[in-house]
Each structure stands twice: as structure tokens, then as C-alpha cells.
Amino acid sequence: MDIQALWNDIITQNRNNLSSYFNDDAVIIWPCTNEQFTVDEFIRANCDYPGAWKGEIEKLVEMGDRIILVGHVHSVDDLISCHVVSFINIKCDKIIRMEEYWSDDGDAPTWRKEMRIGRPIK
């Protein structure tokens, strides 16, 4: 599977290509919001999300039929920034399960700043 092509089609909300990466009965799970999607529902959620997006794969681990992807997604105007960790299971070169954890990027919470622990990564 061409993970970079999948990533590009997700980021550009390419509705016409997205289904080609998935097995017909694939399951997409977003535990952070307690949601499970069919392929068609995932495509709707992804492609109907408002705005224009760009992003990059920051880490990619491929282990046979399992892939772990860490991506940075941000709006074209850079007002919104988030990260996603995707656990992807492949069978016969198609996604059969994708579990994603999405998080908005932001500052450390005040209580940790007040403790004066940690430091910026970048």
C-alpha cells in the first residue's frame, strides 16, 4: 500500500480516491470521540470537514500488515493545528481497520506551567 498516496488523498479530501484504499467492510475507529465509521461514513466525515488542509507524515512504522502513522495536519491558513496517530491494519493491500487518535495542538496547561516542569520540544 502506498501510504504517502493515502495520506495525500486524506489531507486533500480526495473523495474520488479514498475508497480505493479500503476493504469494503473496513472499520474506522476514533476512540477520543467514541465513534466508529464504515468506509463511506469515514469518507463523508473526512471530505465534508470544512476548510482546506495540508500536512505531513512525521513518523511511519511499517510492520508487515500493520502500520503506525503519526501525522501533523493543519489548516492552509495555519490557524488550526493537530496531530493524529493512526494504527492501520492491512489485508491484501487494503485497509481492514484504522484506529485514529486525534489531538488539537496547543500550549501546556497552566497547572504544569506553574510547576515549571517540561520544556518546548521545538
Image (cartoon, rainbow, N blue to C red):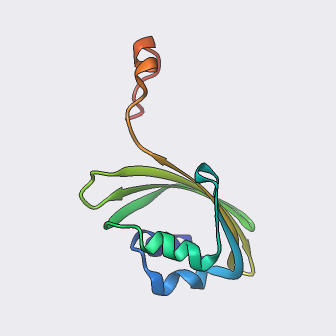
Instruction: State the quadrant of the C terminus.
Output: top left
Residue located farthest toward the top when viewing the structure as drawn: 115
Based on the displayed image, in which of its 4 quarters is residue 38 positioned?
Answer: bottom right
Residue toward you, 7 or 100: 100
Please tell me which residue is depicted at 31% across the width and 66% down the height of the picture: 51
Above or below for 114 versus 48: above
> Residue 59: x, y in percent?
54, 53
Please provide percent x and percent y for residue 111: 45, 18
**Residue 46: where, in percent of width, then height?**
48, 70
Q: Residue at x 24, y 58 (%)?
A: 77
Of 51 and 18, which appears nearest the observer? 51
Q: Quadrant of the N terminus?
A: bottom right
Q: Is residue 99 left or right of residue 92?
A: left
Q: How many marks?
A: 0
Q: Is residue 2 something that shows in the picture? A: no
Residue 64 vs residue 35, the one in the foreground: 35
Picture quarter containing residue 40? bottom right
Q: Position of residue 58 (x, y in %)?
A: 48, 53
Residue 111 in sight from this viewpoint: yes
Q: Which residue is painted at 47% across and 87% down in the image?
A: 16
Question: Hey, which residue is sitting farthest left in the picture?
Answer: 77
Q: Is residue 106 above or below residue 6?
A: above
Identify the residue shown where x is 34% and y is 65%: 53
